[in-house]
Image (cartoon, helix red, strand yellow):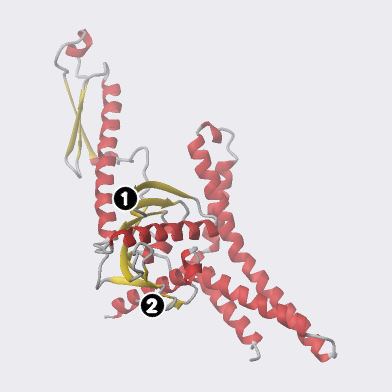
Amino acid sequence: MAVDFPQEIKDLRATMDQVREVTDLARLSARISDLESQAAAPDLWDDQERAQAVTSNLSRAKAEYDRVTGMDQRIEDLEVLVEMAEEAKDTGDDSEEALQEAVRELESLQKDVGELEVRTLLSGEYDEREAVVTIRAGAGGVDAADFAEMLMRMYLRWAERHGYPTKVMDTSWAEEAGLKSATFEVNVPYAFGHLSVEGGTHRLVRISPFDNQGRRQTSFAAVEVIPLIESTDSIEIPDSDIKVDVFRSSGPGGQSVNTTDSAVRMTHLPTGIVVSMQNEKSQIQNRAAALRVLQSRLLLQKQAEEAAAKKELAGDIKASWGDQMRSYVLHPYQMVKDLRTEHEVGNTGGVFDGDIDGFIEAGIRWRRGQEKAAGED
């Protein structure tokens, strides 16, 4: 079947127009300039943690900018390649090799542009965050525990394929084989946006390697994906949110403790949190100490609220019959099928080796379709 290159190239350009609009290259370019200024500061490495964050964010922002702008050049190069193939055909030269190269580059471009397009669909509040993935064995005994370990390896291999750093935080091994549960981080921007569609109950059907009678076994595992909440060293508190009262310190101490109004009572009006500080000798010192304590308490409160929000995001995943979102069938045939998107592949070995981009992309598109449909109701 002949390839309609002009139409395919037109479609690629139309998709890239949408990608550029959502990516907002002007904003991204301004962010790169700001990060470059921070990276050039002579005292940058006085704070190594901040320096690493700045250089890492700069590298990622540049890579994203180059990836988008570089795609336009690849499309132009494809047009030149197609023209060369057409000229070779017109002059009677062998155009087959140039044509095959053009087809290969078109397929590669369609894949890469498709991945960029999927990124534009990640606009949720937490989609830009890194991800924390927890896998728990469900119904199915030792087979379920083994399945949980297979899924953990699948996601770690997926991350490895993309060069994404991961950190295993916790593993609880089952007695005979496999895992009761495991938790790991995927430390790259948009990890949550991509992996959030993997949350749910996964089902495995196979001949059990743990059954000496060789019977077919169905087992389940739950995958929970939550965003990695960013923590800060302190919280900025507007002056208008704080009421400060001063009073005379009481209790044992030197002369300055009892003879001046140096003690401070600080009230955070939005939450009603009250902090009193009188250990320092001056009102200024007590005020600074009270503010630090108040910031710490507000940070703890924020983390508690975010933990509750993460739990709500993760949902209630039962890992049993009736609520599975994907099936991995190894017997009597080979098939992995997502029950929401209908996306399916026959190469089960590839899937368990981390080749799950097709499922993730289909899941993101399906989710966006569900959101649009809900918005129209």
Q: In which quarter of the image is residue 69?
A: bottom right
Point out the frontmost of discs 1 and 2. 1
Q: Which mark is residue 205?
A: none
Residue 190 visible in this rendered orientation of the protein: no
Choose top left, top right, bottom left or bottom right for residue 62.
Answer: bottom right
* Residue 85 on image: x %, y %: 77, 84
> Dot 1, how many residues are within 10 Å of its Cα: few (below 14), some (14-19), or many (20+)?
few
Query: Outermost residue toward the left?
Result: 251
In this view, 344 is above or below 198: below
Query: Relative to 277, is 56 above or below?
Result: below
x and y, in percent, of residue 159 in the image: 49, 57
Q: Mark 1 points at which residue?
A: 175
Front residue (pair 240, 44):
44
- Say whether residue 105 is left or right of residue 34: right
Up/down of 312 relative to 46, above or below: below
**Image quadrant in which the N terminus is located:** bottom right
Quarter of the C terminus within the rendering? bottom left
Residue 341: numbered disc: 2
In which quarter of the view is residue 297 placed?
top left
Question: Are the two marked residues, 1 and 2, in contact with CB atoms closer than 8 angstroms?
Answer: no
Query: Label 1 sits on what residue type?
Result: Glu
Amino acid type of the residue that numbered disc 2 sits on in the rendered structure = Thr
Residue 375, x across and y down, in percent? 30, 76
Q: Which residue lies furthest to the front in this view?
A: 213
Q: Earlier in the sequence, mark 1 or mark 2?
A: 1
Residue at position x 77%, y 87% from top? 86
In this image, 177 relative to 2: left or right? Answer: left
Q: Is mark 1 on a helix, strand or loop?
A: loop
Element class at badge 2: loop
